[in-house]
Amino acid sequence: MAFASPVAQSVLLRLLTALLNLVLLGYTARMLGPGVRGEISLLIATLGIALHIAGMGGGSLLVYLLPRHPHGGIYRRALLWTTATAVGVALVALLVQANLPLHPALWPALLFAFLWGNLNRWMLVARGAILVDHRLNVGNSLLQLVLLAGLLYGGAPTNLMTFGWVLLVSWALIALWSGLLLLPTRRSGPTCSTEMGGTNRGERPSQTSDAASPGERPNQASDAASRGEQSNPTCDAASLGERLCQTSVVENRGNQPNQTSDAANRGDQPNQTSDVVPLGWGQQLRLGFYAQGTDLILLLGNRLAYYLLAATLGSSVLGRYALAQALAEAFWSMSRSINVWLAGRISRSTEQDPATSTMRWCRYAVWNSGIGCALLIAVPDELWVRLLGDGFRGLSGLLPWLAPGMIALAYQGTLMQYYAGTGQFRRNATSAGMALLSVALSAPLLLYFMGDTGVALAQSLSLILSAAFITRRFQRDTRLSLGQMLTGQSPV
């Protein structure tokens, strides 16, 4: 894909990942049934929550902090926080083991592999190796599909434990491989190799094929939730932090948008030098709360329905609902590759007009997600039954209720990159909090009257409300008219 532009390569790789995830989603549904599919959704949601908690000490925050604070302590603290999160979530998961039938030893092993693997990936992203991260994502999805098919073909039981072992092996390999990719940064001298960071010697980071920063989350994301971090114990954190800064530090920061932002102006005044600026634990966690905390709140808002449905209607109903939501989210996840690129350009001040550029990409996200959801809704229910089994009958009835929320989420997720890139994390956190509060209040009530269809309606209404709020906030902050936002034209 060397012939394609960086954005095109990113989109193609994310598209390939989405397609592989869809195949894996359908395969697990067909082979394991709606009950196990529901348990898998709960497991993935729990891992996503752990990932976002770990991200409060690192995660996507590393991409924002390392260019501004070339200080190895940031990485060491991220590693400690990630380890503590893995231990804490594993203990909590073991206490409620009855909800998910996994072997006790699998919980801590899976959490460590998953969280550490993601930390290493965020370090690669902070280094500028966005396409390397996307390739790892493709490899991870393909590996999970091959491993699961091989185990089931060999007679493995069709239960959650089998899928749990697949996740453990795949994420352990990703953690190891991403750690090995970080090792050259310690030995390679003052400049980056094109393989690692996508940079050529003498090029500015903003002109490279991979120079961007994440928007997720996820993974970030979803059952795409997630994105995150992993550490390499053999790599000296201070040296790695300095190497990351030398390759990712912003060279053109004199016109950083919104320099008065409380999050972007805490002792890290925009400079054209790479002087080390100390950053304490409290400051790092405070920024992490607003940066990754926003993604955590969004994830809780999107996954609260899973726990509600599992507790009231059972894992089989949850399996059908989660599959419908995952199908709708697949098209949103494809637009997230643009979010990775957009947030990085805004953060590095390479966008001359970040507000109007953000709105242009918002339109792309809406069209991409809207067309995808329309295609899904057009599929008759009998076809879903033939493909997935009779346990998923009624899937097409959920999609029209979920689609408006997924389109709003795609739009909102792109718009949030403006505030993520300028360090105004409170704006995003407030908007995400509104969605979580709305679904927490409305979902139980609508569940009582409408069943899982009511939960889907509550999900969509909460996301539309949140998108409307952040749009109004964006209008006030940028002084763009509604017409300018719709057309993407710059103000005269």
Image (cartoon, grey):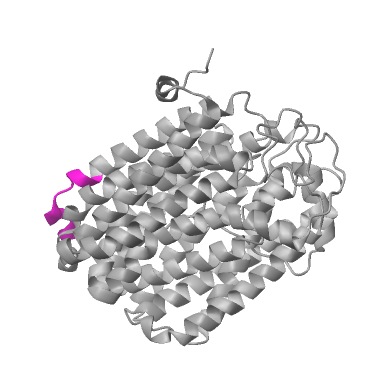
Q: Nearer the viewer, residue 285 or 94?
A: 285
* 110, above or below 322, in the image: below
Quarter assignment of residue 368:
top left
Q: Nearer the viewer, residue 225 or 296?
A: 296
Quarter holding the C terminus?
A: top right
Left or right for 369, reference 354: left
Residue depicted at 36% across the width and 50% down the height: 329
Quarter assignment of residue 367:
top left
* 391, above or below 245, in the image: below
Residue depicted at 51% across the width and 55% down the height: 295
Magenta span contains residue 328: no
State whether residue 223 appears in this view.
no
Residue depicted at 75% across the width and 47% down the height: 266
Find residue 201 and report its horizontal and vertical position in percent: 80, 35
* Magenta segment boundaries in residue numbering: 376-386
Left or right for 50, reference 269: left
Find residue 453 and report its horizontal and vertical position in percent: 20, 58
Residue found at the far top of this picture:
492
Quarter holding the N terminus?
A: top right
Name the magenta segment's main secondary structure.
helix
Find residue 249 and report its horizontal and vertical position in percent: 77, 41
* 288, above or below 131, in the image: below
Residue depicted at 34% across the width and 70% down the height: 307
Left or right for 76, reference 486: right
Find residue 327 and report its horizontal and vertical position in percent: 31, 53
Q: How many marks?
A: 0
Magenta span contains residue 379: yes
State whether residue 167 appears in this view.
yes
Left or right for 144, reference 460: right
Q: Nearer the viewer, residue 440 or 317?
A: 440
Q: Nearer the viewer, residue 53 or 386?
A: 53
